[in-house]
Amino acid sequence: MAAPRRLPALNDCLNCTLRKNGDFCQLPDTLLREFNAMGHLTLYPGNATLLREGQIPRGIYVVCSGRAKLAVEARDGKTLILKIAGNREVLGLSAIVSGRPSPMTVTTIEFCQIKFIEQESFMRLLEGSNHITIASPPCWRGR
């Protein structure tokens, strides 16, 4: 019998034992309650694909625990690993905000606890809050 690719988890950011200083872990109480009500928390095994290069994502993925590989496929067919993402990193954000396909494939490396938030819900949170800003890395500015 094959193992399930995803397992549901308790969706409770307010009482999460993994909370630390981080992007979404330290939102003001009203925003954290709104964020908590969005999306769903899922447990993924290693080697589960979250985003695929060239496809438009349905939302963002917040890595609550575990690690994921961000990679692109080179012209010669080889896979180039760009980064290993870890705790409390947000995946798929640039594609959601820009409305463009994902520039990379994201695959879990190990068992991960990930909160998925649909694009529409996340964009409403961004538009309705003056506490959340999206800053471009210095190398992206002016392009």
Image (cartoon, helix red, strand yellow):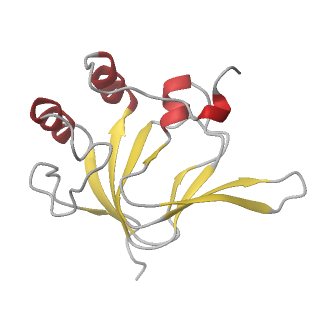
Q: Residue furthest bottom?
A: 1
When the figure is inspected, residue 50 is found, relative to residue 17, above or below; the finding is: above
Tally of marks = 0
Q: In what quadrant of the picture does the N terminus appear?
A: bottom left
Q: Residue furthest front?
A: 138
Q: In which quadrant of the rendered view does residue 103 lie? A: top right
Comparing 94 with 43, the one in front is 94
Look at the image and tell me in which quarter the C terminus lies: top right
> x and y percent of residue 125 in the render?
28, 25
Is 73 placed left or right of 61 in the picture? right
Whether residue 14 sits left or right of residue 69 in the image: it is left
Q: Tell me residue 41's x, y (percent).
A: 26, 53
Q: Residue at x 83, y 53 (%)?
A: 74
Compared to residue 23, the image places residue 41 above or below, namely below
Q: Whole-percent x and y of residue 134?
A: 44, 28
Where residue 47 sits in the image (x, y, percent)? Answer: 53, 69
* Residue at the image point whose x is 17% and y is 52% from the top: 11
Look at 10% across and 35% down and name the residue there: 29
Q: Residue at x 45, y 36 (%)?
A: 58
Up-down relation of residue 60 to residue 48 (above or below): above
* 123 on left or right of 54: left
